[in-house]
Amino acid sequence: MWQRRGNGTERLDGATAYGSEGNTKGSGNVEFGDPNWGTLSPLEPWAGMNAQDQNTTGVVINMMPIRPWFAPENEQNLPGTNKNSQDPTVVFPPSYDTVPHSAYIVHEIDTFSDSQVQNQASYPGALLLVFDGFTLDELGGNPPPAPTLSVTFDSSGGPDASASVQVAAEAALTEGGGPDTPQRITYPLDITIVDPNVFNTFLDTRFVVIEASVSRFSASAFIQLTKQPNP
């Protein structure tokens, strides 16, 4: 929705969400078809007939009472019914978890050669662990916790490769908003070839599987170790 697509948080704050129209009052006449509802106007019919005030909200006249926000039910008196367009529940409505979810790993670098590693062992941000459409709450809070990482040779569940290839997660990058705002949450993953002798364990190419999980969500990817020059 519109409020959740901004890069900042101004759309989620009633004081800034409406820009220059942020403190407008109501006026006009419903009977004549020219009511002007302001952002300070009580939201009708839920707020009830008596919620408007000339000094603080402005007044739109000749409204008709609508049940149950009128006698005999008087549900306008229930908590939370007397609010205006700046109320947090309006500008920052709850997420109903309708955003598609996907977890995946993006390669910035996917191949590491013997000759390359002789000159540079560490590669910050070589992979990006992405949780797309997730909320901070779904991943465990704000900030999201560090992922659990496993590194194996050849296949998932293969021999442990962590003594040769180290993978470390940087702090999560988020898009802002509240804890229930669906967004893209990204962890840069740094790769370090801590033991260059790993290239002596195969003839030409060997795959390394990296698996990452946060909360109950996971993703995996391969990287390749090779004795061939890496273009």
Image (tube, helix red, strand yellow):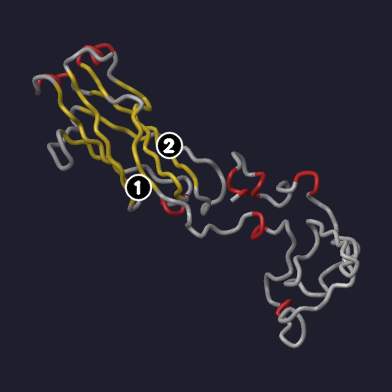
Q: Quadrant of residue 222?
A: top left
Q: From this viewpoint, which residue is outermost toward the front?
A: 33
**What secondary structure is found at the residue carrying circle 2?**
loop
**Front: mark 2 or 1:** 1
Q: Residue at x 55, y 43 (%)?
A: 176
Query: What is the x, y in percent for residue 141?
Result: 45, 51
Instruction: Mark 2: give few (<14), some (14-19) or many (20+) Cα within 10 Å.
Output: some
Q: Locate residue 100 relative to residue 191 in the image: left or right.
A: right
Q: Which amino acid type is shown beneath numbered disc 2?
A: Ala
Q: Locate residue 222 relative to residue 186 in the image: left or right.
A: left
Front-most of residues 160 and 75 = 75
**What secondary structure is found at the residue carrying circle 1?**
strand
Q: Which mark is residue 40?
A: none
Front-most of residues 50 and 149 = 50
- Label 2: which residue? 171
- Label 1: which residue? 214
Q: Locate residue 31 relative to residue 137 in the image: left or right.
A: right
Is 66 located above or below residue 228 in the figure?
below
Q: Residue at x 32, y 33 (%)?
A: 168
* Distance between mark 2 and mark 1 Cα atoms: 13 Å
Q: Residue at x 68, y 73 (%)?
A: 79
The tag earlier along the polypeptide, 2 or 1, is 2
Q: Quadrant of residue 227?
A: top left
Q: On the rendered image, what quadrant is the C terminus found in?
A: top left
Q: Residue at x 78, y 65 (%)?
A: 42
Front-most of residues 198 and 29 = 29
Instruction: Mark 1: give few (<14), some (14-19) or many (20+) Cα within 10 Å.
Output: some
Is 1 located above or below residue 114 in the figure?
below
Query: What is the x, y in percent for residue 25?
Result: 85, 57
Query: What is the x, y in percent for residue 183?
Result: 49, 45
Q: Quadrant of residue 200?
A: top left
Q: Which amino acid type is shown beneath numbered disc 1?
A: Val
